[in-house]
Amino acid sequence: MDFTLSAQQLELQERAKAAGAALRGRSAEWDRSNKVPYSEVVEHVRAHGLLGLTMPTEYGGQGLTAMDYLITVEAMFRNSQFWAIGEPLFATAGPGPCMVMMAESQTTRDKFLPDLVTGARQCAIALTEPDFGSDLTSLVTTAERRGDDWVLNGKKNFVTGATVNQLYAVFVRFDDIAGHRGIGAVIVEEGMPGVTIEAGPEFLGCRGIPHGDLTLENVVIPVENIIRGPGSFGDLMTAFNMERLHNCAFNLGMAGAAYDEAERFVRERVAFGRPLAEFQAVYHALVDMWTDLEALRLMARNAAASAIDGNYPRALETTAAKLYGARVASQITLKALELHGGYGATTNYAIERIHRDVVATIVAGGSPPVLRNAIAALILPGVSVSQRSAGAPQMAPVS
């Protein structure tokens, strides 16, 4: 398959590079303070025309493809060297908007999509629960009917952007229906009575925007806030293939930034009378890093090329690329840190922050064991790969 970029894609890539590079000088301070002026970042990305990339033009989006999204986000990460700068792109074209696009009601789509796609309001994903983690189909956050409304109760954690978003796409269990058949998703709006949003623990990397907690206590939502009702778990999870593509772009961009830092350092650093780059052990390491980056780029672009209607990459290609990226990106950043010698372990150089950000996202979008289970289910038809005990409700397939 030919992945040569078109003139339009090259222009998009250059715009993303410029947007990322303009904020690079602020990344170290945002990491140290654990605080990012998120609304300012959103406006910066908007000014470069990079919001709502894959969303339909009828809702204010740009109608581009998953490939365009991958190219743009990778360039943003590589040139900014910081994770948070990709969040406005994710919030306006990632799984939140993709799920709302799948809403059964046109009223729901009309109510939320224009603001989401244009960045007027941001949507966080509230899926993980304190007691279940990757065991998604065991979630206990409930939605119970009360007249024409629904009442929500439960708690979510690891909600990225918890305190800077205005909307939350929350996975819930409807009417106590067991297993994946009871799961659907709703929109919770900031400021609704009974909604508590708190910043979570500080992270090793990916700092600046909280990964916090969402608590729902008798929160009443109207019917138009239901994205999909019970029995929709498998369909809804297809939107997360876009998240995994974003994870691929992150790993590509940040590992690429690590490579750039390492190459620059070994060219400039002199030892034993010659640049470090002239030592065979050093340039062999750079070759291995470059090769891994190219392999990941091909896997990620193959995943993006599989997308249906621009927004829904296929599960197998995307999950495999995400799994590979989670493994090799941290190896690349660690080798780049090593090539810096003792300086790599100091905060004077960007490589330690880049490495921390990559390590902190190894489990984002699915931990490696969970991804391996998902891939096994797709490549080994007829083989039981369920982690549940016999007789327990089975997880819906992710298409």
Image (cartoon, helix red, strand yellow):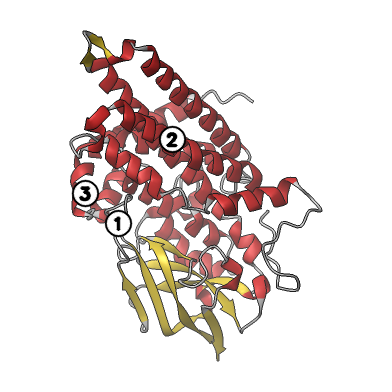
Proximity of marks 2 and 1: CB atoms separated by less than 8 Å? no
Q: Nearer the viewer, residue 19 or 297?
A: 297
Distance (Cα) linking label 2 and label 1: 25 Å
In percent of width and height, residue 89 lies at 40, 48
Residue designated by label 1: 209
In percent of width and height, residue 383 lies at 78, 53
Q: Nearer the viewer, residue 209 or 307?
A: 209
Proximity of marks 3 and 2: CB atoms separated by less than 8 Å? no
The crowding category of the residue bearing disc 1, from other C-alpha atoms within 10 Å (few below 14, some 14 to 19, many at least 20), is many
With 37 as the anchor, is 129 left or right in this view?
right
Where, by quadrant of the figure, is residue 258 drawn? top left
With 240 as the anchor, is 392 left or right in this view?
right
Residue type at tag 3: Trp
Q: Nearer the viewer, mark 2 or mark 1?
A: 2
Rendered image: mark on residue 331: 2
Point out the tag, 3 or 1, that comes first from the N-terminus.
3
